């Protein structure tokens, strides 16, 4: 006998709003470390290499968790997995808030990395409860609020850490995550599970991907100082090639691969992943370099801005990033994803080139950052919504997780590359990077 599943219960604006608040909270929690690395290095007596490790460990664990979260959400139901994942994130935020030293803080960041898997789970829930047109807008809202939350976290982390303590910059967004998770659990109806299977987790693929991502970050971190240790860099590059080769072979043979290479080979998927990677690389480069240039004290360039002033100058970009998600979803529904992505790509190129060519006034950087933030939100949202609605509903989680992994990788590479350019562009004995390093970035 076969059992017919009841159709999913339609959801209202309140449930979508709860998902949006959760995305805003997790985005804020994700981003509090990056702007406070110098403060954490001083308070926890960390070296620069330890600071670099702290800045990327959440991204690495997020890239590993996201495909698993998407797959489990497709298999067992998005809401069920989302609530459990948020329990892990809340625990991680609590550990980070209470951490007395670096090892404990790293444990908290590893647990927090699970938050990046929340987005594909949210998309699974939205896709199952809303028709295609409405789901595109809802996905755009959730994506936009996650990006906006990241900007809010970056802007607020420094003042909160300075006025209260580093503990509160983790505690406040964690409290918001707990509250919004309870709200989602109350307002969001359960979604039916997808097709069941008895295949286990692809642990070899998970381990190889972990090694691949860690080695990639080490290569980027050591590249500016390759002259002092060339053999180490060469060895890491060879190790990276070994990890990539081994991972591809394992995923091709696995019964249930962690990342489905067959799905990744679809033109619509791999093109979206490649463009997401490049867009996020460019965005993160600007996110890293623009505050540095505002703070810079070079001869004829830089503005010697304080941390509070930098936060105010970046505020218009944060607003643009928050609005870009809903705009991208609406634009996708009305004009199609290609038109939205083309608009975003042109806007991104104009913003980056304009800032590189003209950066003698603060408003130049403010306007350029707004264009870049808006372009990023439009592109990523359009590619996320088009991907989520183009595949079978039971594949929504794994398909969108591929886009999110590309986003994480692009962001991590962009941040590391920006730091490498400034390090390479800083003359020996000086603490001021050359203006040409900013222009190149």
Image (spheres, grey):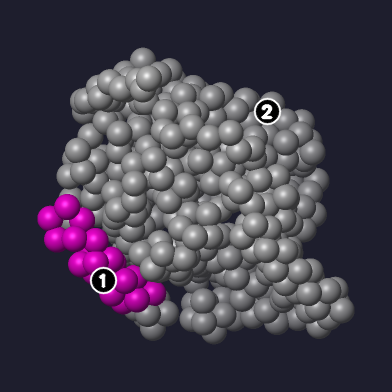
Can residue 199 be seen by looking at this rendering? yes
The x and y percentages for residue 268 are 36, 64
Q: Residue furthest front?
A: 1
User: Can you identify the residue that label 2 sits on?
Assistant: 95
In the image, is 432 to the left or to the right of 85? right
Image quarter of the N terminus: top left
Q: What's the residue at 17%, 52% (across, down)?
A: 333
- Alpha-carbon neighbours of circle 2 within 10 Å: few (<14), some, or many (≥20)? many
Q: What's the residue at 61%, 60% (across, down)?
A: 252
Mark in front: 1 vs 2: 1
Can residue 219 be seen by looking at this rendering? no
Determine whether 375 is above or below 224 in the image.
Answer: above
Q: Which residues, given as a range, are shown in magenta? A: 332-352
310 magenta-colored: no
Marks 1 and 2 in Cβ contact (< 8 Å): no
Determine whether 360 is above or below 47 in the image.
Answer: below
The x and y percentages for residue 253 are 65, 57
In the image, is 163 to the left or to the right of 7? right
- Alpha-carbon neighbours of circle 1 within 10 Å: few (<14), some, or many (≥20)? some
Q: Quick one: label 1 or label 2, which is nearer the N terminus?
A: 2
Magenta residues: mostly which secondary structure? helix
Q: What's the residue at 42%, 28% (across, down)?
A: 193
User: Can you identify the residue that label 1 sits on?
Assistant: 342
Alpha-carbon distance for marks 1 and 2?
Answer: 42 Å
Determine whether 133 is above or below 166 in the image.
Answer: below
Q: Nearer the viewer, residue 240 or 331?
A: 240
């Amino acid at each position: 006998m076969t059992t017919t599943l009841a159709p999913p219960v339609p959801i209202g604006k309140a449930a979508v709003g709860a998902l949006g608040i959760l995305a805003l909270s997790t985005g804020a929690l994700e981003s509090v470390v990056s702007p406070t690395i110098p403060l954490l290095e001083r308070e926890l007596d960390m070296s620069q290499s330890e600071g670099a490790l702290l800045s990327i460990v959440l991204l690495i664990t997020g890239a590993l968790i996201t495909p698993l979260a998407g797959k489990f959400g497709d298999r067992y139901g998005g809401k069920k997995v989302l609530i459990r994942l948020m329990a892990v994130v809340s625990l991680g935020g609590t550990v980070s808030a209470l951490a007395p030293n670096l090892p404990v803080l790293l444990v908290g960041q590893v647990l927090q990395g699970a938050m990046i898997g929340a987005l594909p789970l949210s998309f699974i829930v939205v896709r199952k409860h809303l028709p295609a047109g409405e789901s595109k807008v809802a996905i755009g809202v959730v994506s936009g609020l996650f990006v906006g939350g990241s900007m809010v976290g970056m802007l607020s982390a420094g003042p909160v850490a300075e006025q209260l303590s580093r503990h509160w910059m983790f505690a406040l967004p964690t409290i918001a995550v707990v509250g919004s998770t309870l709200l989602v659990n109350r307002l969001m109806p359960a979604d039916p599970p997808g097709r069941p299977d008895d295949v286990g987790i692809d642990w070899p693929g998970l381990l190889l991907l972990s090694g691949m991502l860690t080695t990639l970050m080490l290569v980027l971190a050591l590249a500016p100082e390759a002259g002092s240790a060339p053999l180490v860099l060469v060895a890491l590059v060879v190790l990276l090639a070994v990890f990539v080769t081994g991972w591809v072979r394992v995923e091709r043979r696995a019964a249930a691969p962690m990342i489905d290479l067959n799905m990744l080979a679809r033109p619509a998927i791999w093109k979206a992943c490649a463009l997401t990677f490049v867009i996020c690389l460019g965005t993160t480069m600007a996110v890293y370099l623009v505050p540095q240039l505002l703070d810079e004290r070079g001869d004829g360039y830089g503005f010697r801005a304080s941390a509070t002033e930098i936060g105010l100058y970046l505020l218009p970009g944060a607003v643009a990033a928050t609005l870009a998600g809903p705009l991208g979803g609406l634009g996708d529904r009305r004009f199609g994803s290609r038109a939205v992505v083309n608009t975003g790509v042109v806007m991104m190129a104009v913003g980056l080139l304009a800032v590189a060519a003209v950066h003698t006034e603060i408003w130049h950087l403010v306007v350029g950052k707004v264009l870049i933030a808006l372009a990023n939100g439009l592109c990523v949202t359009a590619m996320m919504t088009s991907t989520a609605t183009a595949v079978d509903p039971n594949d929504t989680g794994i398909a969108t997780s591929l886009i999110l992994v590309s986003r994480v990788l692009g962001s991590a590479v962009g941040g590391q590359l920006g730091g490498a350019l400034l390090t390479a562009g800083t003359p020996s004995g000086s603490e001021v990077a050359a203006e040409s390093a900013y222009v190149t970035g």
